[in-house]
Amino acid sequence: MVHQGKEFGVDLYELEKVAKVDFPVVSADYGDAIGSCDRVLGGADRAMRRPEQFGGGALGPVHQAYLDLHETMTGFLKETKTNLDDTAAALGTAAQHYAGTDQSASDELHRRARLDQALDGKL
């Protein structure tokens, strides 16, 4: 990695793009997974209720194990999502910080960002 000038600006731009585009996309996927897990949880009580032929009413013996597994899995998903969001913020901050130390790098970083914005408007 070049540590100054226009080439450094290219590297900073790529770093910022990862922070603003790539990490948020993956984080959103984790958010979707969390939402899916929570939607399934809403029907777990109904699905695990014993039929009348087997005593009815009470939740089956698997119910608590499922709740524990759900809590563990969604905890992992939420922690990973938080880590992705925090990493994205740190990468974006680092790119901007380093851009502030090299005017040529900063100019290239912002030039590429403007170009991306213009292209997004045309797609």
Image (cartoon, helix red, strand yellow):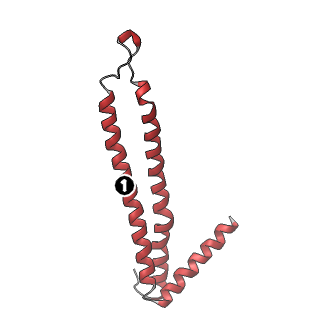
Q: Nearer the viewer, residue 26 or 74?
A: 74
Relative image position of residue 35 (x, y in whole percent):
47, 44
Above or below, 92 relative to 103: above
Quadrant where the N terminus sits is: bottom left
Residue that lies at the very extreme toward the top in this rendered image: 53
Q: Nearer the viewer, residue 95 or 53?
A: 53
Q: Nearer the viewer, residue 62 or 118?
A: 62
| Residue at x 45% of width, y 83% of height | 99
- What residue does disc 1 label? 80
Relative image position of residue 11 (x, y in whole percent):
45, 78
Left or right relative to 101: residue 68: left
Above or below, 10 relative to 40: below
Residue that lies at the very extreme toward the right in this rendered image: 122
Quadrant where the C terminus sits is: bottom right
Quadrant in which residue 95 is drawn? bottom left
| Residue at x 46% of width, y 56% of height | 26
Relative image position of residue 21 (x, y in whole percent):
51, 64
Quadrant in which residue 27 is drawn? bottom left
| Residue at x 39% of width, y 21% of height | 49
Relative image position of residue 75 (x, y in whole percent):
34, 47
Circle 1 Cα neighbour tier, 10 Å, few/some/many (<14 / 14–19 / ≥20): some
Above or below, 73 relative to 82: above
The amino acid type found where label 1 is placed reads Thr
Above or below, 115 relative to 4: above
Residue that lies at the very extreme toward the front in this rendered image: 57
- Label 1 SS: helix
Q: Total marks drawn?
A: 1
